[in-house]
Amino acid sequence: LAFIKEEQEDLKHQQIKVEEKEVYCSQGEEQIELKQETDTCMVVPVDEQTDHTESEPNRNQVIFQEAAEAENQNQGRRKPFSSVICEKRLTFKSVFDARMRTHTGEKPFTCVNCGKSFRQKSNLTRTHTGEKPFTCVTCGKSFTQKHVLTRHMMIHTGEKPFSCVTCGKRFSGKSNLSQHMRIHTGEKLFSCVNCGKCFSHKHVLTRHMMIHTGEKLFSCVTCGKSFTKKHDLTHHVMIHTGEKPFLCVTCGKSFLQKRNLSRHMMIHTGEKPFSCVNCGKCFSQKHDLTRHMMIHTGEKPFSCVTCGKSFCQKHNLSIHMRTHTGEKPFSCGNCGNGFFYKLSLTQHMMTHRGDKP
């Protein structure tokens, strides 16, 4: 009985718990091999193994494969929640549930103040309270979410880890790279339900929708005129302030908008990049070429609703409409006579000066 008890004690000491990835270890001078038995391993001296015919490389391959399977099982225990859609493994169920909502689009957290819904509870709680617990140590700016602060810090560090494989341009955020890639692919995910026009970015579609709704969010505090785009309001305000920030270095003339300066510069350079394919005539502005092309096509898109007469240009239609309305916007300062056309007023003024028209 003492002999059997001693043999059981030896066997008990040879069973060890698997806690590391190693598949071989040594006990004194004797090499031993670990064979997994559920959560424990049996220590078996190599020279006592029954199968001596199996080659060393094949035996190692089997052992490494078993170790890899054991590691996968351990990872499954550490991260038991796996997404069937993206196959990502997660440790906590709450994180797993939040992850799955990115696939399903579910937004279970609804604001009682405005009715807006969110995927994460943290987004719901801080919107109206204004709480911003995450602060940048460099500039002091605060944020409601930690990942937004992390992305903001890249402004200071200059880090841009996401690179376009097509043109090499780099971005600080993955979403920015994804949006940029649509330039190369031509992908336009966002379509207007009214006219079917498609856009590569959601904010461009949102701005476009204002054409159909007539919504104009940006109003001038001076005259009350409203605009769909903020930069249009910014340019409009310069009319009241008299600001003209774009200066021609050649003649000193100033302009409200940069594109007007660029167009003006062609007067000095003589550049006429837009040429007619029919007659070869060149123009400095694209809209001048478009208008010129109607001479060749015979197109007259602007029609009078009263008499049906058509015109190539909108301003010609406006002038024509005066014949129906009787409007005479050009008045003589001497006798008060009114005229349909500015040229008619100029010719009339010669009669007061004694000039011959």
Image (tube, grey):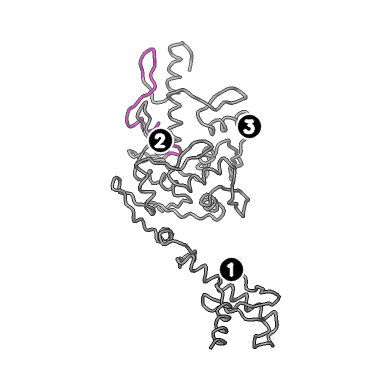
Give the residue drawn at x 50%, y 40%: 136
Distance from the alpha carbon under mark 2 to that under mark 3: 31 Å
**Which residue appears farthest toward the front when viewing the image?**
2
| Relative depth, front residue between 278 and 211 | 211
Relative to 121, say whether 327 is above or below: above
Q: Which of marks 1 and 3 precedes in the sequence?
A: 1
On residue 329, the disc is: none
| Relative depth, front residue between 77 and 129 | 77
Coordinates of residue 149 in the picture (x, y in percent)? 49, 44
Residue 238: in magenta span: no
- The residue under label 1 is which amino acid type? Glu
Which residue in the protein does label 3 denote?
Answer: 270
Front tag of 2 and 3:
3
Disc 3 element: loop
On residue 20, the disc is: 1
**From the viewer's perspective, is 94 left or right of 296?**
left
